[in-house]
Image (spheres, grey):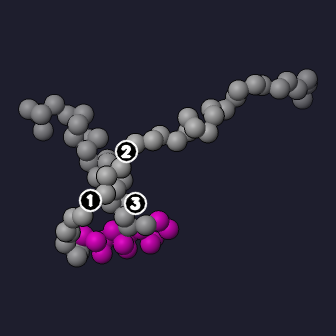
């Protein structure tokens, strides 16, 4: 294998791995069928349906923020 060397600062510090964003709690009314869909999918992927809804909303916003308003 050859000579081994110790590489300093190879990985980011843990505080740099966590992206901290402010969260705001909201209450929304969704169709039962929508919630049932997320619950079913969440169970298949061993996660919470709230987390899936949150990820979906974040993806949706990111997608449409990248599109100019007159092109949407």
Taking depth in this image into account, of 20 and 4 the one nearest to the observer is 20
Residue farthest left in this picture:
70
In which quadrant of the rendered image does the C terminus lie? Answer: top left
Q: Main secondary structure of the magenta part?
A: helix
Tally of numbered tags: 3
Asked if residue 56 shows in the view, the reply is no
**Residue occupied by mark 3:** 51
Secondary element at image label 3? helix
- Dot 3 or dot 1: first in sequence order is 1
Q: Are marks 3 and 1 in contact (CB under 8 Å)?
A: no
Q: Is residue 45 left or right of residue 3?
A: left
Q: Position of residue 19 (x, y in %)?
A: 47, 40
Q: From the viewer's perspective, is the residue at label 3 or at label 1 nearer?
A: 1
Distance in Å between CA atoms under marks 1 and 2: 13 Å
Residue that badge 1 annotates: 26
Give the SS element for disc 1. Answer: loop
Q: Quadrant of residue 32?
A: bottom left
- Tell me the number on the disc at residue 22: 2
Magenta residues span 34-47
- In the image, residue 61 lies at what x, y percent? 25, 44
Q: Quadrant of the N terminus?
A: top right
Considering the numbered disc 2 on the image, is that residue within a helix, a strand or a loop? loop
């Amino acid at each position: 294998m050859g000579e081994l060397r110790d590489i300093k600062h190879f990985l980011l510090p843990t505080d740099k791995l966590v992206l901290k964003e402010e969260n705001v709690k909201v209450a929304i009314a969704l169709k039962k069928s929508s919630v049932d869909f997320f619950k079913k999918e969440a169970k298949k992927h061993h996660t919470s349906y709230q987390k899936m809804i949150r990820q979906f909303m974040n993806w949706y916003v990111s997608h449409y923020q990248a599109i100019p308003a007159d092109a949407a």
